[in-house]
Image: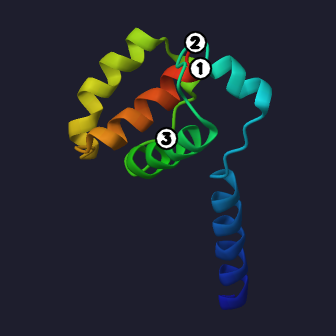
Amino acid sequence: MKKICTAVFSSIVIVACSAKSFVLTDQQLSSMRQKVPNITLENAKAGYKVYSEKCANCHQLYRPGKYTIPQWNNILLKMFPKAKVTSEEEQTLIRDYLHALSK
């Protein structure tokens, strides 16, 4: 029984970790730059990383395309303090990532 539990737990961890990967094509990056002109692949990846680390601690991650830029701004205004995102750099990375992929 202990071996089964360990195998199931290991499988869950592997699946959960693989779901955190971030893949972006050149075409998607080009589309993102229409909303956030200076975004780079590195910044988009960093924004996703900070977003997933800070926000998934309390709730599921919402698809960036679920909300518009003004809606994200309202959400982030409330959520940054709750998630303890105090660094301007982290706030900018998250905001740019979400804005670039917003509805």
Q: In terms of secondary structure, where does tag 3 sit?
A: helix
Instruction: Count how many numbered circles sit on residues in the image.
Output: 3
Q: Position of residue 33 (x, y in %)?
A: 61, 19
**Could you tell me which residue is drawn at 52 percent across and 19 percent down?**
36
In the depicted view, which residue is nearer to us: 13 or 55?
Answer: 55
Q: Earlier in the sequence, mark 1 or mark 2?
A: 1
The disc labelled 3 sits on which kind of residue? Gly
The Cα–Cα distance between marks 3 and 1, rounded to whole angstroms, is 15 Å
Q: Position of residue 22 (x, y in %)?
A: 67, 46
Q: Name the image quarter holding the N terminus.
A: bottom right
- Front label number (3 vs 2): 3
Please, what secondary structure does the residue beneath circle 2 have?
Answer: loop
In the rendered structure, which disc, 3 or 2, sits on the residue that comes first in sequence?
A: 3
Local packing at callout 2 (Cα closer than 10 Å; few below 14, some 14-19, many 20+) is some
Q: Mark 1 is on which residue type?
A: Gly
Specify the label residue 65 is tagged with.
Answer: 1
Q: In the visual, does 19 lie left or right of 48?
A: right
Identity of the residue drawn at 40% across and 19% down: 72
Asked which quadrant contains residue 71, the reply is top left
Q: CA distance from mark 1 to mark 2?
A: 4 Å
Q: Position of residue 25 (x, y in %)?
A: 78, 34
List the residue tagged with mark 3: 47
User: Which residue is nearer to you in this view: 36 or 8?
Assistant: 36
Separation of marks 3 and 2 at Cα, in angstroms: 17 Å
User: Would you name the residue on which mark 2 appears?
Assistant: 103
| Residue 5, percent from left and from top | 66, 80
**Is residue 36 shown left or right of residue 34?**
left
